[in-house]
Amino acid sequence: MAKLVALSRYASATAAMTLRFILLAGLPALVACSASRSQSAQSTAEPPFSVTEVARFDSPWALDFLPGSGVPKTNVALVTEKAGKLWLIDVTTGKRQEVAGVPKVHVEGQGGLADVVAHPDFAGNQRIYLSFPEAGPGGTSGATVGYGRLILGAGPPRLEGYKTIWRQQPKEEGGAHYSERIAFAPDGTMFITSGERFQFTPAQDPNVDLGKVIHMTAEGQRIGGHHYTLGHRNLLGLAFAPDGRLWETEMGPMGGDELNLILPGRNYGWPKASNGSNYDGSGIPDHKSGDGFEPPKVWWNPSISPSSLLIYSGDLFPQWKGDALIGTLSGEALIHVRIRGDQAAKADQWAIEARIRAVDQGPRGEVYLLEDGDSGGRLLRLEPKR
């Protein structure tokens, strides 16, 4: 019976999310709000970039550029596809090669091969990290993170010696809200996001992984206790700013999508506080001063469905330096949020007319977007207009 209830809950959630996208498509321009006051969305009629298609993939999820010897990024990137394929691509030519040796991936609902991140010392250790769900007993599943060595220059590219270093506990039925984003800190330690699997209350339970940001070593040992922060929902963007601050984007329920500054030990409120509403229309207490929860720096109503986060550090777009670029799914836009220290404010929003699954920065400071599979799965390069 418990299994049937859980499956019913997931089916209802999926239907509700679909309805959410349909309803939001006809709503007026997005309104971005800070935690303390409303801000009008500032649409930029003419984007400052040109768009070039580089390649196409089948339901891509993430990309990451490989570091080289003495350079932080090369022209070679890794791209994951939800069904379990990992690709090596030269973005200057669009040439792709499939990487062999990828572990078996559990594909269900929102789950599949997800994030890929190269170790900061990839040029020395050839290590890359992957995240994806694994199946558990009784129809359950849970997110995992692991690493292996990417072998290049000795035949076709392949992954060797893969080792799982984190398993999300507990495993749950249904395929929602795995999150499983990975970000390396300047000191070489690692942060991962662990979604609440559409289970709500475990996000407030300090003894489980659901609804948490977790800090660990590159080998998977937890740092500073069980978790770094709690009270999260579906955390799909995670990135460090040049000043060392950690930022995160998070999907709210119906409205209330968030950009958060991640601070150790803080509780971000879910499901006790949110600036959105439940899918059945029932209210959730808004974030307010003195409620004991860390409020978002920026939030959105109606929803934009933030899928990814880049803190820009390049020189091609100097006006973006140190700021956040957010890819959105239902919003079908690239959003620019201005960051000044520990404060953030909505700056620009450019319609891409496609569901954006990932955003990353290339070696020259150019920006790359990955379209969701439903929008064509293109890898797009953004460069300044000339």
Image: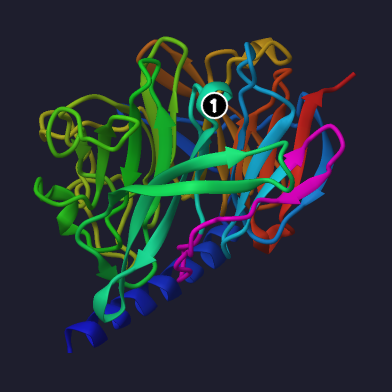
Left or right, 332 with reference to 124: right
Give, as a single range, the part of the protein colored magenta.
89-112
- Residue 348 is situated, as x and y percent measured from the top left of the image, at 61, 27
Q: Is residue 225 above or below residue 197?
A: above
Which residue is at a point 58% across and 40% down the rendered structure image? Answer: 150
> Where is the N terminus found, in terms of image quarters?
bottom left
197, above or below 215, in the image: below
Quarter of the picture holding the C terminus: top right
Quarter of the view holding residue 260: top left
Residue 277, image quadrant = bottom left
Would you say residue 377 is visible in this rendering?
yes
Q: Residue at x 74, y 28 (%)?
A: 75
Please say whether residue 282 is one of the residues in the magenta stretch: no
- Residue sitting nearer the eye, 27 or 106: 106
Instruction: Give the side of residue 334 with respect to residue 52, left or right.
Output: left
Label 1 sits on residue:
122
| Residue 45, horizontal then vertical, whole percent | 75, 32
- Residue reaching furthest to the bottom: 1
Question: Which of the two residues, 189 or 297, is positioned nearer the viewer here?
Answer: 189
Tally the numbered discs: 1
- Relative height, residue 121 to residue 62 (above, below): above
Left or right: where does residue 364 sit relative to residue 169? right
Residue 94 in the magenta stretch? The answer is yes
Q: Which amino acid is tagged 1?
A: Phe
Q: Secondary structure at mark 1?
A: helix
